[in-house]
Image: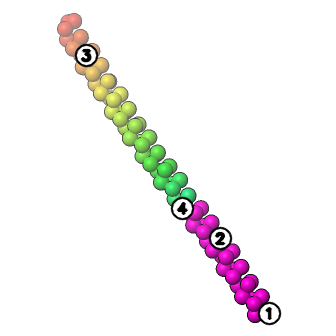
Amino acid sequence: MYKSQTLHNSRGSIFVLVLVVTFLTVMLGYLLFQTNTNLYKASEEQTIQSVLERNMSTKAERAFALSASLNANGS
């Protein structure tokens, strides 16, 4: 009787341990996935920002060239 009780408790402990390890593994995977997603979004935002900055500097250069051209033609 005592031996089967110990075996049953051992099985219960192993089952609980497996559940806890599974839960922790799933949570760790979720955290890694979230981190990767956030890093990707930050990288994407950085790319968009650099494209916008390049676009603005190109527009400024064009405006400066147009202004210089108009000034040269006007004088």
Q: Which mark is residue 36?
A: none
Cα–Cα span, label 2 and label 3: 68 Å
Q: Is residue 33 above or below residue 2?
A: above
Q: Which mark is residue 29?
A: 4
- Discs 2, 1 touching: Cβ within 8 Å: no
Identity of the residue drawn at 30% across and 19% down: 63
Classified by dominant secondary structure, the portion drawn in magenta counts as helix
Q: Earlier in the sequence, mark 4 or mark 3?
A: 4
Cα–Cα span, label 4 and label 3: 55 Å
**Closer to the observer: label 2 or label 1?**
1
Horizontal side, residue 75 vs residue 3: left or right: left
Tell me the quarter of the picture where residue 54 sits: top left
Q: Quadrant of the N terminus?
A: bottom right
Identity of the residue drawn at 23% across and 11% down: 70
Depth check: give the residue in front, 5 or 54. Answer: 5
Cα–Cα span, label 2 and label 1: 27 Å
Residue 53 % position (x, y): 37, 33
**Under tag 3, what secondary structure?**
helix
Tell me the quarter of the picture where residue 11 sits: bottom right
Q: Amino acid at mark 4?
A: Gly
Q: Amino acid at mark 2?
A: Val
Which residue is tagged 3? 66
Cα–Cα span, label 2 and label 4: 14 Å
Q: Is residue 71 magenta?
A: no
Cα–Cα span, label 3 and label 1: 95 Å
Which residue is tagged 2? 20
